[in-house]
Image (tube, rainbow, N blue to C red):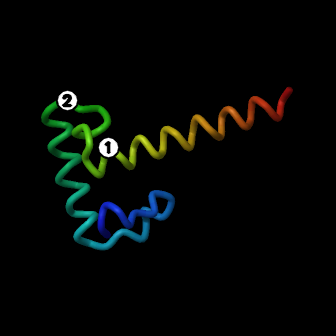
């Protein structure tokens, strides 16, 4: 999975190489105290995408309650 060709919504489809890279980035982030991965890393981009989707879903949920 190349960085420019990423479907962040389908991360379960990641190949073995990508999963190993994510595990390495996660371990490195934990050692260095980065809660959302090293800035600019693939892990960081995945987390940011998830956070953005969650915020959008929460906003949509709030607007539908009104």
> Is 55 rendered above or below residue 21?
above
Residue in the image at 35% along x and 62% along y: 4
Residue in the image at 36% along x and 46% along y: 45
- Lower sequence index among marks 2 and 1: 2
Q: Residue furthest top?
A: 66
Helix or strand or loop: what does disc 1 sit on? Answer: helix
Q: Residue furthest front?
A: 4
Question: Could you tell me residue 21's position as x and y percent?
Answer: 21, 59
Question: Is disc 1 surrounded by few (<14), some (14 to 19) or many (20+) residues within 10 Å?
Answer: many
Quarter of the picture containing the N terminus is bottom left
Question: Could you tell me residue 35's position as x and y percent?
Answer: 29, 32
Q: Quadrant of residue 56?
A: top right
The residue labelled by disc 2 is 33
The residue labelled by disc 1 is 44
Q: Quadrant of residue 37?
A: top left
Q: Are marks 2 and 1 in contact (CB under 8 Å)?
A: no
Relative to 45, 17 lies left or right: left
Question: Could you tell me residue 48's position as x and y percent?
Answer: 42, 41
Helix or strand or loop: what does disc 2 sit on? Answer: loop
> Is 8 rendered above or below residue 35?
below
Relative to 57, 33 lies left or right: left
Question: Is disc 2 surrounded by few (<14), some (14 to 19) or many (20+) residues within 10 Å?
Answer: few
Of marks 2 and 1, the one in the foreground: 1
Residue in the image at 58% along x and 35% along y: 55
Residue in the image at 52% along x and 39% along y: 52
Relative to 51, 56 lies left or right: right
Q: How many numbered dots are placed on residues in this image?
A: 2
Quarter of the picture containing the C terminus is top right
């Amino acid at each position: 999975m190349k960085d420019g060709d990423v479907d962040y919504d389908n991360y379960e489809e990641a190949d073995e190489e990508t999963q190993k890279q994510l595990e390495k980035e996660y371990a490195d982030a934990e050692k260095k105290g980065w809660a959302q991965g090293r800035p600019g890393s693939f892990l960081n981009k995945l987390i940011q995408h998830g956070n953005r989707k969650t915020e959008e879903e929460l906003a949509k949920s709030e607007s539908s309650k009104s």
